[in-house]
Amino acid sequence: MIPRTFSSFHDAYAGVLEAITERPDQTISTRGNTSAELLDVSFRISNPRDRLPYLVRRPVNIAYNLAEALWYLGGRNDLDMIGYYAPGMSNYSADGHTLTGSAYGWELFQHGPDGMSQWDRVIRLLTTDPDTKRATVTFFRPEELAIESNPDVSCTIAAQFLLRDGRLHLTSYMRGNDAYMGMVSDVYAFTFMMEFAAAQLGVDVGHYSHHVGSMHINDRDMKNVRRLLNEARQDGYQRPAFDVLRMPTASDWNDIETVLAHEAILRANREPLTSAKLQAVALGPYWQQVLLVFEVYRQIKHTDAPVQAATLAALDPGYEWLVRRRWANRMPKEAE
């Protein structure tokens, strides 16, 4: 267990990986994966907007992180969108078209008999009873275990929103979490949705807490994890410092719908996102940055040429840092 508060996910990530590699509780083997496991891991992030790790040995796929969060907020379960950013997700689709346990947004935004979704009920409850302890959404369904061969069982059990002293906190509860791979995208998406919920409520963001029954690192990833940890232990190491992006407090569903509409155009390679087209989009700078990341990914997926220098130059410095290291072989020569 890690009863610690970290200021950023960058620090939490390194702390969890170090704890598992140095003090594992168990070695387990399930579904062909042997892993080092630490039970009952908990940590808190005091600034959940600082949700990205900046490590040369683990440059995250920021396009996927953003797409997954928006896929959830879009209430989707289709493989078409998320599979474009993570082709490996097709391995978890029973029918080749949809996902079940991984499609958290489908659970959050399906309308019930009262015409409201879990998300709607939480927002309404927090509006009418700010001190409530009931603002909880659930993901894991008992019937997921009824089919032994189910390839996509939800890793997240539930999440609880707590509005205290004018700040919205979020606590997630997970049955299992791959510390090296899955935790990065899970924390990113959950804190992103938390920030959007705070905008809907007109309140500030509080802290984010992450509770996991089985936190683990697969043996196949252990060498990469040790290299990553060694990077942060080098003499003189300093984490790259970038301004933390803040979602506008006026963000609403129109922003989400507009971003998703343009994402679909870029994903289908129907037209590039030029500077002129970006400025014509009815979105503020924060959301325009999201589209720029998707444009970078469009160039990587649909062309053989280096990513355009002008596109890179327009990116937020933190996004640019990740893009240049994640796809180093696709950078323009002047970036070398």
Image (cartoon, rainbow, N blue to C red):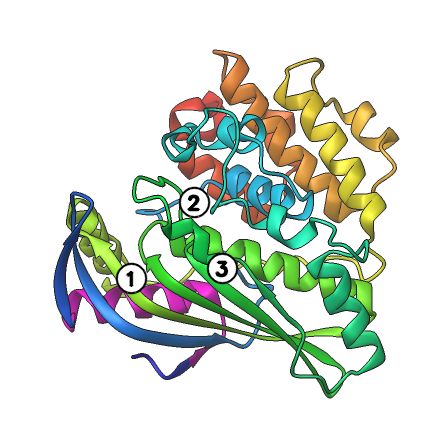
Say if mark 2 contacts mark 1, CB within 8 Å.
Answer: no
Q: Earlier in the sequence, mark 2 or mark 1?
A: 2
The 10 Å Cα crowd at callout 1, few under 14, some 14 to 19, many 20 or more, is some
- Is residue 53 in view from this perspective? no
Report which quarter residue 119 is drawn in. bottom right
Quadrant position of the C terminus in the picture:
top left
Residue name at image x 46 percent, y 65 percent: 9
The 10 Å Cα crowd at callout 2, few under 14, some 14 to 19, many 20 or more, is many
Report which quarter residue 32 is drawn in. top left
Q: Mark 1 sits on what residue?
A: 232
Q: At numbered mark 2, what does the secondary structure look like: helix, strand or loop? A: loop
Image-based side of 314 in relation to 190, left or right = right
Residue name at image x 83 percent, y 70 percent: 202
> Most prominent secondary structure in the magenta stretch?
helix
Q: Which residues are magenta?
A: 5-24
Look at label 2 and name its amino acid: Val
Q: Alpha carbon of mark 3 to alpha carbon of mark 2: how far?
A: 13 Å
Look at label 1 and name its amino acid: Ala
Query: Residue 60 has which mark?
Result: 2
